[in-house]
Image: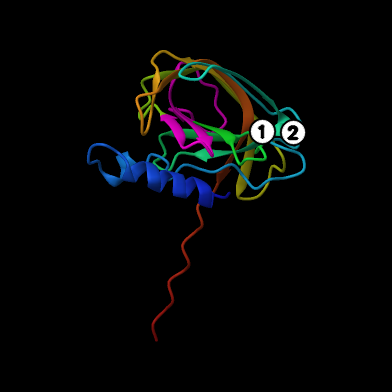
Amino acid sequence: MKRILSAALIAWAIAAGATAAAPQSAAAANPLAGLPAAGAQNLHGCLASGDGYLRARIRGALVLDVSLRNSELECDGGPRPDGSGIRVSFAGPARSDGRRLRMVFGVARATEGNLGRELPTNLTVIFEGEQRMFATRGDDKCTVDEFKQERVGALGGPMRNYRVIARGFCITPVKALNSEERILVNSFDFAGNITFEDAEAPAPATQQH
């Protein structure tokens, strides 16, 4: 599973970190670090089954009613690097001027194959091409109140794929990284994919003769 941010997004993050008003640690100045980019573009969109989607109601500095269908989305997901939950990324269609919406949900306490309710959620909303990014910087502002997983694809092998369905809301506005703008994601729901992969077994030690 690819975990590489686009060159444009990396440049945006560097610029945003450089213009931060107060000194911050590298992790705080660049909350994009370690976030998964959406998977490589493919012909079937988000899910091969054709039933992926992303919907969100955004108010505040921006007023948007997001409603993107499977063919308009790229999506990717898997466990958080620290093992504290699951992370799912969605990217909408790129416009001719390079602008694109990306939303990343970090769902705490979610575990492989299990249902979940009232799960604390970290949310990052990125407007690529506009130098705008909003991040909760924590799991206490948004909640996934229903979280489901459906196993898809081949059952054997080291990789396990799931269709993940979730809905939730935020109770506190999300602040922009490099301005005083705030948005409130009143509600969101999505269906995307997550992949779990077994760790590679260590190579056997060679015997000394």
Choose between 23 and 5: the one closer to the eye.
23
Could one spot residue 3 in this view of the protein?
A: no
Residue 63 horizontal/vertical position (percent): 54, 16
Choose between 10 and 203: the one closer to the eye.
10
Verify CB contact (< 8 Å) between mark 1 and mark 2.
no
**Is the residue marked by circle 1 packed among few (<14), some (14-19), or many (20+) residues within 10 Å?**
some
Residue 86 horizontal/vertical position (percent): 49, 34
Mark 2: secondary structure: helix
Residue at 55% in and 35% down:
89
Residue at 65% in and 48% down:
40
Residue of label 2: 71
Q: How is the image coloured?
A: rainbow
Which callout, 1 or 2, points to the residue nearer the camera?
A: 2
Choose between 123 and 198: the one closer to the eye.
123
Residue of label 1: 151
Q: Residue furthest left?
A: 23
- Magenta residue span: 105-134
Q: Residue furthest bottom?
A: 209
As drawn, is 51 to the left or to the right of 76? right
Could you tell me the amino acid type at mark 2? Ser
Location of the C terminus (image quadrant):
bottom left
Residue 68 horizontal/vertical position (percent): 67, 26
Residue at 57% in and 31% down:
113
Mark sitting earlier along the chain (1/2): 2
Residue 155 horizontal/vertical position (percent): 69, 42
Query: Is-magenta flag for residue 26?
Result: no
Q: Give the alpha-carbon distance from disc 1 to disc 2, as whole Å.
A: 21 Å
Q: Relative to residue 202, is residue 30 depicted above or below?
A: above
Mark 1: secondary structure: strand
